[in-house]
Each structure stands twice: as C-alpha cells, then as structure tokens.
Image (cartoon, helix red, strand yellow):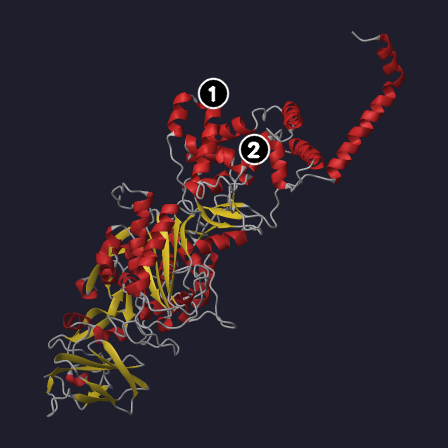
C-alpha cells in the first residue's frame, strides 16, 4: 500500500530525486574511473615458464622474490575450488562483491565479544586486498568493500576466482594454489587429493604459521577443521579417508629445467606472467641427463647444445643451450642454440639436393675425389687422403670435401647461398665477403636453431620450417628442396655408409635416422644433425669462445649423442614403438641403371662405353651426364682408331695399313691415375703404333725419375726406415705427390720431395701436375 502523502511527495519531488540519483551515479562512475582498482600488470610481476603439460620449467620471482604460477580454473582440481568456496565464501556466486549478511554477523560478533570471531570478507574482498595493500582499519574495510564492488563490475566471477587461485598467499615465497601444490607436494594442482585440497584452502588464513613443510602438526589440525566443515559437500567416507592422510611436504625448491630456454622465453614474452611453451618434460629431462653423462668425457671449458623439433608441428620438444647451467667454466649462461658458428660440412646435404633440383646430378653421378685446384682454391679432405672416383652418394656419406667443392663450382656459390636463404636458412658471411667455394666447407656462420629448422625439410617433403616455442606461434615455412630431392638425400644419408656404421654400432640407420656430421676448421665446432620420421634434432659441441679442441669432431663426439637423443625422445614420447614402414618415393623419383664414366643410363650402351654399372635414384626420370672434363677438352664419348692388324692405336695421318674405328668413353683426366688395373685396361687406349709413336698420350711428358717401376727398397744399414727423394721431369708448375692414394705433399717441377716409407709392403707412388698429366710407379719396401 502506498500512502497518499508519499505519492504526493514523489509527484512534487520526483524530478529532483531522479536528477539526484543520476548525479550520484555519475559521481560514483567518475570516482571509479579516477580511482580504478589495482589489476595485475606485467612490469614487476613474477613470471613462470611452463612445459606443454603445465609443468614449471623455471619460475622468475617478482621484486619481492615471490614465486607465482598463474593458473586457469579448469586446470585446478574441483576439490580445491569446492574447499575454498565452502570454507571462505559460500555465497560467492550470487553476491555483488560484498555479503551484507556476513558483514552484519561479523560486526555483531565483534561488538559482543570485543574481538574478531569470524570474518565478513568475501572472496572478492580478499582478492581486492591481495591486489592492493589495504590497512586493517574501519576506513580500510570500507575501501576494501569499494574495491570489491569495482572488481565485480569489471571482471566475471571466473576471473575473480582465478585471481584468488593465483595470488592467495601460501607461505614463504609461494603464492597461488599451483605454486603451493608443486612446491609442497611436487604435483600439479589438478591432482590434489581431498586432504591436500583442504590444507591449501586453509593455508592463506595463516600462511607462515601453517606452512606444512615447517609446521606439519599445525597444518594437520587446521586441515581437519576444514575437512569437518566439508563433510556435507564431500560425504562422510571421503572425509574419513582424507583425515587419515598425514601431512608430508617437501622442501620448497626452485624449478630449473631448460633454464636457458626459460630465460629466452622470458625475453620473448616480457609481458606474460605465464608462458606456456611446447617443451616436453620427458624429452627435456632425457636430453639434459644425456648431456650430463657426457661431461666427464669433455675437456674443461667445452660446452654442448641440443635441440629437438617435432616434424609435424615444428614445435620444439627439447632445448639445451649449454652443457651445465651451474658450471661457469663451461660458459654456463651462453646459449649455443643461438650462437653463430661455422657449420663445417653440415650444408652438404643441401648442396647435393639443390644440385639434383637443378638437373646437374643424380645419386650416382661420377665425381672426382682427387687433389684439384679450383681457381687457386685447393680443398683437402678431413682424413687427408683421397678416394679417386666416387659417386654423389659416396661423397655425401663419407663427407668428402673435394667432390662437394666440385659440385658447388658447377652450381655457383652465390646461387647456393641465395637458395639456402630462400629456404629459410640464414647464413652470415664474414664482413665484406661474398659467397665463394669455402661456403660448403664451413666458410659461413649459422646457429643450431636455424640449421635444425632447415634439416626438417628432409622429413617434410622438402619444406623447411622455423622452430616454434609456443603453441600460438605462427608457422613459418619455406621450400628448401623439391619433394623428390629431399627423398633422395634422406635415403642416401639414411643408408649411412662406413661412418654411420661406426657410430653406436650403426643403430642410427636401423632406426631410420638420416644424419650428417660437421667439423669446422681447427676442430672448433663439432656438429651432428639428423631427421627421423617424427623428429629433427641437432647437437653442437665446442667452446663458445672459439678455442680449438683437437681430436673432437662431429663423428666421434656429436653423432653418438645425437643417436642417443633420438632413442631417448622416442622412448619418452612413444614407449611402444611401432615397426617402421618403408618410405614410398615420390612420383618424380625413379631408379635406373647408369654407367660410368659417362653417367648416363645403361640402357642401350655397348659394354665398351659402360666400364662400371650402378643403380641410381633419378629425379624427373633424368640422368645428367658426368661433368665436363675441367682439364681436357673434347667429348667424353669419342671415336678412336686401331690398326686393323696389330690393334695398336693409330691416326689417319700416320697409319700404314687398314684402320678400324672404336668407340671409347673417356674418364676425367684427374681420375685416370686412380683407376684400377682392369678399368684402366678398358678405359685407356692401347700403345701407339710405331709409325704414330710421337702422338701424345695423356700421361706423356711427365715422368718419375730415380725410381724404377717394380723396384725393391730396403731399410738403411742401421735399420731406419728408407727415405726416398721423389722427383719428376716434364711437369708444369706445381706437382702433387701421392702414396697409396694419400697426398703426401707438393713440390715445384724443379725440386724433389723427401718421403719416409715407414711401412713395409707394396706402395704406389703417383705424381700429377695441374694439367692432368701423371705418372706412377710401384715399389716394394722391406
């Protein structure tokens, strides 16, 4: 019933009342805007870097040295949320930030007993106090109420509850349920038991006095009070079981997994309190343990770095930037995943893959692993010996330097670098330098991160990708190789060759790992990078300051660790390993028989032109011919003439009888000294007929002197190993001397070269000049 007087009052003063209400509301809104509540910022707040499953990798405290792990509501056990709401604020979901009934009850109890008996603060009011220091006075209580209302106007109930879950004090340097759960119990808050949830629900009431790691008896008593109150929520049986649990808490310690990665993540995302990354805890722990097991075998000041990427997602599974985060002598805080270093031979797979795409080679193209000069650049092999004629596959598997330079010389250094950069591999050249042939042997700088990203192309159809550290990071991809070239290169590397069979008993090839090693000049950097169906991984070993480590190279120190990392990550991520299925070649990759020395298909070639037959992978069904001879002009396939009666070599100008034409296939001039006896007999023409004996054979004009072919050499009278002075006549410019295929030195055409024959047996001595002429003799040493 409305009294007539009140109706008249509202008629007379209604407009003024409405204006007054509007003015009051405006003042309140202006005050709210002028004095907004404190909400979490980023400038000085704690940060935590998490693995993909939420496990903390590393926590960075705020200025007050508080560890805080921001957590979402759905990541916390419902038991804890039920305990907090039942114990702290049962009306949380319906009040506007303030519970007038609770405030009135608290005020009445305080007035009656002269002290605080129960609190009247809602969960929202507690959050307001957590975010902003408020004095515990009547004025402070009013301010706290105002702040609570402001929070309710700005945030949802879920957001307010998540702030409490993150900022509730939990004793010592810990804040929030996640930090407390992991700090005290070593588990995520989603796995809290009934007893643990009740303990952490009451802990913010007196965090220092109830710390379970220091005062377990007090914590137990407080926990049981909460459990008794929660019996209507959880049931009697759950409460009885929970009260039987003892309070056992571990000492709080800082999480420290992938510490250098965590530092990097913090720099990448300075405004995030919680940084969720892609790292896998099991894979990361396995990699760190494997690295730790190698430390005793490494010299002082030598560090290690390793990176593992998931091929399907490009997400980083494991990241180790240094060998030991606590050993400053090993440059503990230098992140060598990012450090720019010489890659050694690790770029060779891309060279051969790009040469395949350019139509220069197939997998069995004939290359020359012999001493050569490329416009004054004279590369040597790591083992200081030479193999003579080799295929592309053999050159890659053995990591031979001279054949790689030969291919790069044909492809072009500038084009090679440009194609790598187009594919996402960022190479750094020395200041003021332009690409040259040394690029393929490590004459550039690259870091482990970009190198591993580039190698993913071998397992992803030729498409390389940039490693991703967070699930929301964009996918950055670029085509490095065609799908067919990537398949062929991976198949060659997966086959392994002699080097792979020596590393860990050849287990890498059996597990389907295609990998390549590299060693930079002076043993400064040892690399191993490889791919499997699921992962791409890389390892770097060396001193970050660039000091050489003689005897430490990719195959003996980096490759064994790489193979172990693949095995460990596979075991961690897929304990029940399924059998490998053979990979199917792309449609543009075929196999065919090819012939040396021409390099073309064997189909239709007469035996005289096919000295050696091999099975090759072809791209686009094309078999490019062997590179043109660098030292000798003319076609590789040519017609020679024989005396019809004697079979000796003749020319029309000097023939005395009938001639017959013979088709011949010519080997590159630099390879002729390296051919075995049977191949030489088929490949080289016979002696000249007497009437044509002045004609020049490739080896004519250069002659070893002072030693007779077949000569026997004995030790000196005192038993010392014999010393021969090697000398030749008729050569041009510099002479190259080899014993049993291994280069022993160089000399001018006017000087001799002394060599000690320390091993008995038969030895082949070969001399070559820069025009491709050669001579050889065999001696026996007793």
The disc, 1 or 2, on the residue closer to the chain's N-terminal end is 2
User: Which percent across, then down, holds residue 755?
Assistant: 21, 86
Residues 544 and 503: in front is 544
User: Which percent across, then down, holds residue 551?
Assistant: 30, 71
Element at label 2: helix
Give the quadrant of residue 579.
top left
Element at label 1: helix
Residues 741 and 324: in front is 324
Question: Considering the image in quadrants, where does the C terminus appear?
Answer: bottom left
Residue 161: numbered disc: 2
Please, which residue is most extreme toward the right here?
12
Regarding residue 603, the answer to whether it shows in the image is no
**Residue named by callout 1:** 232
Q: Is residue 630 above or below residue 748?
A: above
Q: Residues within 10 Å of mark 1 (few under 14, many from 20)?
A: few
Residues 780 and 231: in front is 231
Q: Is residue 430 above or below residue 11?
A: below
Q: Which one is in front in this view, the residue at disc 1 or the one at disc 2?
A: 1
Residues 517 and 586: in front is 517
């Amino acid at each position: 019933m409305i009294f007539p007087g009140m109706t008249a009052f509202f008629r007379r003063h209604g407009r003024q009342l409405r204006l007054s209400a509007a003015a009051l509301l405006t003042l309140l809104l202006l005050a709210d805007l002028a004095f907004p509540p404190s909400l979490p910022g980023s400038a000085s707040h704690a940060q935590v870097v998490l693995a993909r499953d939420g496990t903390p990798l590393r926590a960075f405290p705020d200025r007050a040295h508080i560890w805080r792990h921001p957590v979402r509501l759905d990541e916390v056990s419902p038991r804890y949320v039920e305990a907090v709401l039942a114990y702290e604020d049962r009306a949380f979901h319906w009040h506007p930030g303030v519970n007038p009934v609770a405030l009135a009850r608290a005020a009445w109890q305080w007035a009656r007993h002269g002290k605080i008996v129960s609190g009247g603060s809602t969960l929202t009011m507690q959050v307001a106090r957590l975010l902003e220091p408020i004095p515990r006075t009547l004025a402070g209580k009013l301010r706290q109420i105002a702040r609570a209302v402001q929070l309710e106007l700005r945030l949802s109930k879920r957001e307010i509850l998540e702030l409490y879950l993150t900022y509730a004090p939990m004793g010592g340097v810990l804040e929030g349920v996640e930090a407390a759960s992991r700090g005290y119990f070593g588990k995520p808050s989603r796995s809290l038991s009934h007893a643990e949830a009740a303990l952490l629900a009451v802990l913010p009431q007196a965090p220092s006095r109830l710390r379970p790691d220091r005062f377990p008896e007090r914590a137990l008593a407080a926990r049981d009070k909460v459990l008794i109150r929660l019996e209507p929520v959880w049931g009697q049986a759950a409460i009885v079981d929970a009260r039987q649990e003892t309070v056992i808490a571990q000492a709080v310690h800082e999480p420290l997994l992938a510490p250098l990665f965590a530092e990097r993540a913090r720099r990448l995302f300075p405004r995030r309190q919680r940084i969720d990354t892609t790292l896998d805890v099991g894979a990361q722990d396995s990699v760190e343990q494997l690295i730790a097991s190698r430390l005793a075998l490494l010299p002082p000041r030598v560090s290690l770095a390793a990176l593992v990427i998931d091929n399907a997602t490009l997400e980083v599974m494991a990241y180790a930037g240094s060998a030991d985060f606590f050993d400053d002598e090993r440059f503990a805080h230098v992140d060598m995943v990012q450090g720019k270093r010489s890659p050694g031979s690790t770029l060779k797979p891309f060279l051969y893959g790009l040469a395949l795409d350019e139509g220069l080679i197939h997998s069995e193209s004939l290359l020359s692993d012999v001493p050569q000069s490329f416009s004054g650049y004279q590369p040597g092999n790591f083992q200081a010996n030479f193999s003579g004629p080799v295929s592309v596959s053999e050159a890659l598997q053995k990591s031979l330097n001279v054949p790689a330079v030969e291919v790069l010389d044909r492809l072009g250094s500038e084009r090679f670098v440009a194609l790598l950069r187009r594919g996402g591999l960022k190479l750094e050249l020395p200041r003021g330098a332009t690409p040259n042939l040394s690029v393929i042997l490590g004459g550039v700088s690259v870091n482990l991160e970009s190198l591993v990203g580039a190698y993913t192309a071998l397992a992803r159809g030729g498409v390389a990708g940039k490693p991703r550290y967070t699930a929301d990071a964009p996918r950055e991809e670029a085509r490095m190789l065609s799908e067919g070239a990537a398949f062929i290169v991976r198949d060659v590397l997966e086959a392994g060759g002699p080097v792979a069979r020596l590393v860990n008993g050849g287990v890498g090839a059996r597990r389907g790992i295609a990998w390549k090693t590299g060693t930079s000049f002076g043993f400064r950097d040892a690399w191993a990078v490889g791919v499997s169906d699921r992962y791409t991984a890389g390892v770097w070993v060396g001193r970050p300051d660039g000091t050489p480590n003689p005897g430490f190279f990719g195959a003996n120190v980096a490759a064994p660790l790489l193979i172990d990392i693949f095995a460990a990550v596979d075991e961690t991520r897929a304990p029940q390993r399924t059998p490998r299925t053979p990979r199917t070649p792309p449609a543009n990759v075929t196999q065919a028989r090819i012939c040396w020395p021409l390099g073309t298909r064997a189909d239709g070639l007469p035996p005289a032109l096919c000295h050696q037959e091999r099975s090759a992978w072809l791209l686009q069904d094309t078999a490019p011919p062997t590179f043109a001879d660098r030292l000798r002009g003319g076609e590789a396939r040519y017609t020679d003439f024989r005396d019809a009666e004697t079979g000796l070599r003749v020319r029309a100008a000097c023939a005395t009888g009938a001639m017959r034409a013979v088709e011949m296939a010519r080997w590159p001039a630099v390879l002729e000294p390296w051919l075995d006896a049977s191949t030489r007999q088929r490949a080289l023409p016979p002696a000249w007929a007497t009437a044509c004996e002045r004609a020049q054979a490739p080896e004519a004009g250069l002659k070893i002197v002072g030693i007779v072919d077949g000569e026997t050499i004995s030790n000196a009278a005192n038993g010392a190993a014999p010393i021969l002075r090697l000398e030749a006549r008729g050569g041009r410019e510099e002479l190259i001397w080899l014993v049993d295929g291994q280069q022993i030195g160089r000399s001018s055409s006017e000087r001799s070269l002394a060599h000690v024959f320390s091993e008995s047996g038969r030895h082949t001595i070969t001399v070559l000049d820069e025009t491709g002429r050669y001579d050889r003799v065999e001696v026996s040493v007793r």
